[in-house]
Amino acid sequence: MVLGIIGIAGGLACFLPLFVAPYAWIMGAHAVRDIDASGGQLGGRGEANTGKILGIVGTVFLALALVAVVALIVLSLTVDDFWDDGSTY
């Protein structure tokens, strides 16, 4: 759950912490699977599920951010005067 929170909150502040979101998704899914397989001996399914969901949301944000960066790079390379705002100095 902590990795999911770091991925979402840190990702909104700056781009870099979003890279922990897929790891939070994987770790949350493993924890939920282990808790379900324990037959009631392990607790914390809600926290693990929350971490998994936050990891999924953070991964979606990461994918959208990467698509935006790639689109900006492609547009800047293919469209003439893409960054020109029309003003003269």
Image (tube, rainbow, N blue to C red):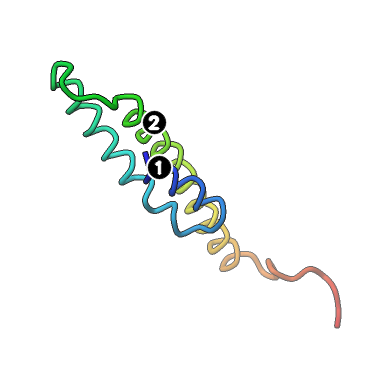
Cα separation between marks 1 and 2 = 8 Å
**65 or 73, which lies in front?**
65
Residue for point 44% across, 55% down: 17
Q: Say which residue label 2 marks.
A: 50
Tell me residue 22's x, y (percent). 34, 45
**72 or 15, which lies in front?**
15
Q: Quarter of the image containing the C terminus?
A: bottom right
Residue for point 39% across, 31% down: 50
Count of residue discs: 2
Which amino acid, mark 2? Thr
Q: Earlier in the sequence, mark 1 or mark 2?
A: 1
| Mark 1 and mark 2 residues within 8 Å of each other at the beta carbon | yes
Which amino acid, mark 1? Gly
State whether residue 24 is above or below residue 79.
above
Q: Secondary structure at mark 2?
A: helix
Q: Quarter of the image containing the N terminus?
A: top left
Q: Say which residue label 1 marks.
A: 4
Classed neighbour count for the residue bearing mark 1: other residues with Cα under 10 Å, few (<14), some (14–19), many (≥20): many
Residue for point 24% across, 24% down: 43
Tell me residue 16's x, y (percent). 45, 59
**88 or 27, which lies in front?**
27
Q: Is residue 6 left or right of residue 83?
A: left
Q: Is residue 83 left or right of residue 78?
A: right
Residue for point 45% across, 48% down: 62
